[in-house]
Each structure stands twice: as C-alpha cells, then as structure tokens.
Image (spheres, coloured by chain):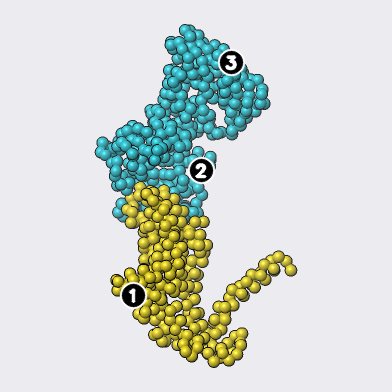
Chain colours: A cyan, B yellow
Amino acid sequence: MTLTLESVSKTVGREVYIENADLTFETGSKNVILGRTLAGKTTLLRLMAGLDKPTTGRILVNGEDVTGMAVRKRKVAMVYQQFINYPSMTVFDNIASPLKLSRMDKETIKKRVYETAEILHLVPLLDRLPAELSGGQQQRTAIARSLVKDAQLLLLDEPLVNLDYKLREELRIELQQIFQRREAVVVYTTTEPAEALMLGGNIVVIHQGRILQTGPTPEVYHSPATTKVAEVFSDPPINYIDGTINGNRGTIAKDISIPLTGHLEGIAPGDYRFGVRSNHLFLQPQGSADTEIKATVELSEISGSETFIHVRHAQTPLVVQESGVKSRRIGEKVSVFVHPERLYVYDLAGDLIASPAGPDPAGGAGERGEIPQNRGCDLRLRPSGAALCL
Amino acid sequence: MNRNHVKTGLLILYFILLMLPIYWMLNMSLRTNADILGGFALYPKHPTLENYIKILTEPAWYSGYINSMIYVSMNTAISLLTALPAAYAFSRYRFIGDKHVFFWLLTNRMAPAAVFLLPFFQLYSTFNLIDTHIAVALAHCLFNVPLAVWILEGFMSGIPREIDETAYLDGYTFPRFFITIFIPLIRAGVGVTAFFCFMFSWVELLFARTLTTTEAKPIAATMTRTVSASGLDWGLLAAAGILTIVPGALVIWFVRNHLAKGFALGRV
C-alpha cells in the first residue's frame, strides 16, 4: 500500500493545524513524525486515519482518493497517547473486538488473540477488565488491539509517553521487533529525538504545522536542513554560535578563530551561524585540533547519569553535556572545547550550508557516540535496535 | 461521651424527625377510622389491613396506580429514547447555537407547570388526547427530556471521545457502537436518568389531573376523592399514601450509589 498526502491542510477556525503537507509512505516502512508538543503530530495522524477531514488537499491510498471515506471502511489501526480501551470489556474482548466485526469464526479469533497477546505478554491478563491493569498493561492491550487485525496503516500517537521510564524502554524494544515483522505502513509520533533515532526508518520533522524536513532518520539527524530542524532534533537543543568566514579564516563568537578544515573548507566568505550539539562540547580538550571557548557556568543540571552544564561566553549561551554527575559551581570559569569539524554551518536565514562529514569525525568526539543521551537512558548499550547501527 | 457518640446521637435524632411523618402515616393506615378518631396511640393496638384490602380490590382505587404506572413508564421510555441521541450530539459535536440550545433546554424547567396548563389543555383537546396515558406522558416530557439530556450529557462527556474513534477504527457502525459499547459505558447514567424521569413524573399532579378525567386518572388525583361530605377517610388515605411511596423507594434502591452524580446533572 502507498499512502499519499497531497498538499493537505487543516485549519480549525483561524488556527492552522497543518499547512500544505505532502507526504508519501510505502508498505513495510517505518516512519517517525518528530515534533514538539502542539506541532501538529496528532492532527497529521488523525488526517491519515480519516478521523479528521482535511480542509484542503487529498489523501490517496494506492492512488485512489479516500479523502472523505468513512474510517471503518479503511484498514487503519491507531494507538492513542492516552490508554484507550473499552472499559466494559475484558482484555480478551478488547483485543478480539476488531476481529469480531470481520465475521471471523470463533476459533480463528481465539487463536489470533492468543498469538497477539503472547507477543505483548498479556496472556495471563486476558480475563481482566482494563481498569484492573497497570498503565503499561493497558497500553499493551491497546497496542494488541491495533496489531490483531491486518491493518495496512498502523498509527501510533506517542504511545509510550505516559508510561514510566522502565516500561517505556521495554515496550520500545518490543515495538521495534513487532514493526520489523509488519507488512504495513507504520507511522509513529514522538517528541523525543532519542526515540526517533532508535526507531530509525524515515522521519518527518514537523514544527508549528509545517513539515520541515523528511528523509531517512540518521541522515536527517546528521544534516538538519535548517536551524529549526536541528533544534527539534536535538535534546538538549543544539547550541548556536554566530561567526564569520573570511577567506581561509573562520571566527566564532567574535574573537575565537577556527581552522577551516574538512567540511568547513571552501565556504564562501560571509556571516554564518555555527551549530554544535551539546554532546560535542567538552570541558576537557579531546585532541590538539580542539578550539577553546572561555565561559562562565550559569547552571548545572544533573539528569540521570548525565550533567547538562549551562555556560555563557559573552552573549552566547551554550549547554555542555557531560557524562556522569559533574556538578560545577555557578560563576565558575571554565573552558569549553569543540572540534571545529563538529560544527554545522547555517546561513543567517537558517539554511544548512555544510554539515560534519559523518558520524565518526576526525577528532575524539566519536567516542561519545551520536545518540543524544536522553534523561539517563543508555541507548548505545542496548543489544537491539537501530541505535547501534548509527 | 466522645465525638462519635454525639454524631451518632444527632444522626439518630435527625432520622427520627425525618421518619416521623412516614411512621405516623403507616400507623394510621393500619387502623380503622373509628380507632384513629377515637384516641391517641403511638402504635396500632388492633392492627388491620382493611384499608389496604379496600385499595387493592376496588378498581376505582387500584386503577389509579395502574394509570400512574403506565404513563410514568411511557414517559421514562420516551424521555430516554429522545434524550440519548440528543445528549450524544451535545456532548460530541459542535454546531451553531449548540450552547444556547443546551441552556434553553434547562429553562424549560424554570417555568411553573401552571404556565403551560391552558395551552396544553387546548392542544390535547384538539388532538382528542384528553384522558389518555400518552397525553400525560408527553406533557411530562416538557420537564423530563431537558433533565434527561442534561444528566446524560454529563455522563457522556466523561467518556473520552477516543473510545468512539477507536470503535470506528475497529469497524463498528454507529448504531452498533452506540448500543453495544457506548450505552454500557454510561449505564449508571441511564439508570439515574430513568430514576429522575420516573420520580418527577410520579409526583407530578397538576398536568396529570388536568389532562385526565376517568380513564387515565392518576393515583394522586384519586386520593383527593377521599374528602367527602362525611369528612376525611383517614385510614384509607394513609394506606394509599404508603402504597404511593413504595415504587419510588424501590427505584431509589437501584440507583442509590449514583444519585449524587445525578443530582449534579452528571457533572462530578
């Protein structure tokens, strides 16, 4: 199946929820929609499902216009951010509900429900009511219901966001494996860059109802086309330092000169914004090529096994991500080191001019991996998942 | 004496005051007129079921109960059947003037029934509906349908809209979803609504008496008959009163856990 959104817009009253979305999804693809809250992720999913009608534009399935078609006639399954189950039915009946309507015989239904429940570890709970389950089990029931029928379009709207961290980790890995076997278009929304990277596949970065960039997830991560994409696709948000390139000399933050090597070579002279992710900033030099930025500590924020140190160099605020708990006193003078080849170069309009060559740069930064560490979770150490492939 | 004893004592006192008139009615219903008028007694010294037997055997009396039951049931059914879809629409859809219409419904309860008496009498006369059960049932819809819509809307809005959508995604048609999934979810609300419709229709006297003469005469109207030239038939009236309380008390039993929510129009 091919799902195509053709210049789809959605406005409610005077507010624009989705503006001119053009997207195509193919069967067997995993797609992540990344955006902050209120970016329009849910609206986009609802438009794909047919729960909402686009104000303008068309939605095509295999080239056929399905814009006004009733939801129940489409083969769509959806998992909501809130745990949505039928409270008056047992877990078994909840999962079986989409099958019962397709006039399947009882034995087949039972078999299918058990198969799905097996994958999601729900077999011992089949006789319970949703109210008697924990949050994670409720959400697993909802996921099971969406998986049990052969939906061609599987939509998951931040399915893990209301779960605690441990469960989220567990389910995320389970979901990965489930998606792998699925002959469907899977669309998954999230606000977390780390989750998006782990799911891999293709990504749609969306901000304020507008689609900013699409493409394979790692590629978009390594070359965010605009400053906005880089901000949305970094956690903590990417740091920006204003600078200039003048012939064969670069200057950042007015007075720090940087060598123009690697991807920085051959950029036309002018004013630019340099972007650098927090995990590429260090408090100790990592190699001889590193550039030193003198700064003052404004705040250090310990988050799990990570420390985010907020510093300021003149007018430029920076966030340094250090692994381990490394508290710094406020007002302390520190040196922040960055390898120039980790710098993204944007023009003043926010468009990408040059991005670092690859995941493993010439400097020592490769050691740190490419995944922005998210609130103490150590994705790199997980034996499964796309995160490792980066 | 600690605080708990004071509390219990006060509560007992309150219930005594509350139950006293009902007890007194029960007391009277078990005595003959001569006995009642003869002297004061805290309890019936020679209890008799004479009054009850008279009510339950004389068609003039028991038909009053049957008539009341018929129009009350009709009214409850009509109110629920119209209010369920209406409440669903108010709770799920936005349309022009929805909030105004919703509020206007409630204003129907703000006018005294007497205001509508004359137009109703004329209207029902024109359609030859005077002295039929349906006439009273329809007249009572005036205040029961708005109430039912308000209570049900409250209960329905407590159900997340995503449940509706999940059902459509699962392939349910609207009627099937509404009957097999949605109504079971708000069954407490439906019960409470039915109770309120029952109660208001059961106690209403003005419409019921005006729109009926003999065939559909309610029990409340029949009770006024006991005032005759020979004075009041105390015992009989008390027995009729006790029998009138019974259905209400039975229905309350079923919805006792949800009554508070009903009084708050489902918005708790």
Residue beneath disc 1: B130
For label 1, the SS is loop
Same chain for mark 1 and mark 2? The answer is: no
- Badge 3: few (under 14), some or many (20 or more) residues near its Cα, within 10 Å? some
Q: What residue lies at 28% left-to-right and 38% top-to-bottom?
A: A61
In this rendered view, identify the residue nearer to me: A179 or B72: B72
Quadrant housing residue B72: bottom left
Percent position of residue A332, x then y: 66, 22
Farthest-out residue, right: B1
Marks 3, 2: nearer the viewer: 3
Chain under disc 3: A
Q: Could you tell me the amino acid type at mark 2? A: Leu
For label 3, the SS is strand
Chain under disc 1: B
Residue B16 in view here = yes
Chain under disc 2: A
Residue beneath disc 3: A292
Percent position of residue A36, x then y: 47, 34
